[in-house]
Image (tube, helix red, strand yellow):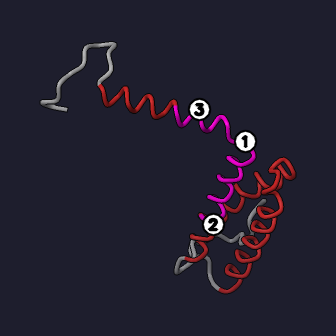
Amino acid sequence: MPGAPRAEPGTMTEEELAAEEELLEVAKHLAGVPAEDVVANHCYGLFELAALHLSQQPPQLDKARLAIDALGLLVDGLGDRLGQHAGALTEGLSQLRLAFVRIAAAGPASDGQADPEPQA
């Protein structure tokens, strides 16, 4: 940035050091969280993304399909390895797939795609 003081090469500013320490703390915390919880959290994000695209007017079927397929690959592929989250994620995936088919059948696809069903 113009006018900002420059650190000598190989040194870090106080802000950079603070950010580095914060990243190390986050990494330390994350290393203590069970992996199935972290993966499940990402799955829930994909669920929300798919639901968001299905709820748009008009529905964004192509975008919803991508999120549903990605969620399906994780949930179907990992199964019980998702631990306590496996049942809820499997049920949520089924609900999304059913909603997708119902919405796609109710009207023309907003993305012009001929294949109305998710792949996974």
Q: Tell me the tag on residue 50.
A: 2
Query: Measured from the top left, where is residue 112 in percent x and y?
Result: 59, 72
What amino acid type should be assigned to the residue bearing mark 1?
A: Ala
Which residue does the numbered mark 1 point to in the structure image? 35
Residue 25 located left or right of residue 82: left
Q: CA distance from mark 3 to mark 2?
A: 31 Å
Reply above or below: 5 against 85. above
Q: Secondary structure at mark 1?
A: helix
Reply above or below: 62 against 28. below
Query: Measured from the top left, where is residue 31 in percent x and y?
Result: 65, 34
What amino acid type should be assigned to the residue bearing mark 2?
A: Ala
Query: Measured from the top left, where is residue 120 in percent x and y?
Result: 78, 59
Which residue does the numbered mark 3 point to in the structure image? 28
Q: Are marks 3 and 2 in contact (CB under 8 Å)?
A: no
Q: Is residue 61 magenta?
A: no
Q: CA distance from mark 1 to mark 3?
A: 13 Å
Pointer 2 or 1: first along the chain: 1
Magenta range is 25-48
Mark 1 vs mark 3, foreground winner is 3
Q: CA distance from mark 2 to mark 1?
A: 23 Å
Camera-nearest residue between 56 and 115: 56
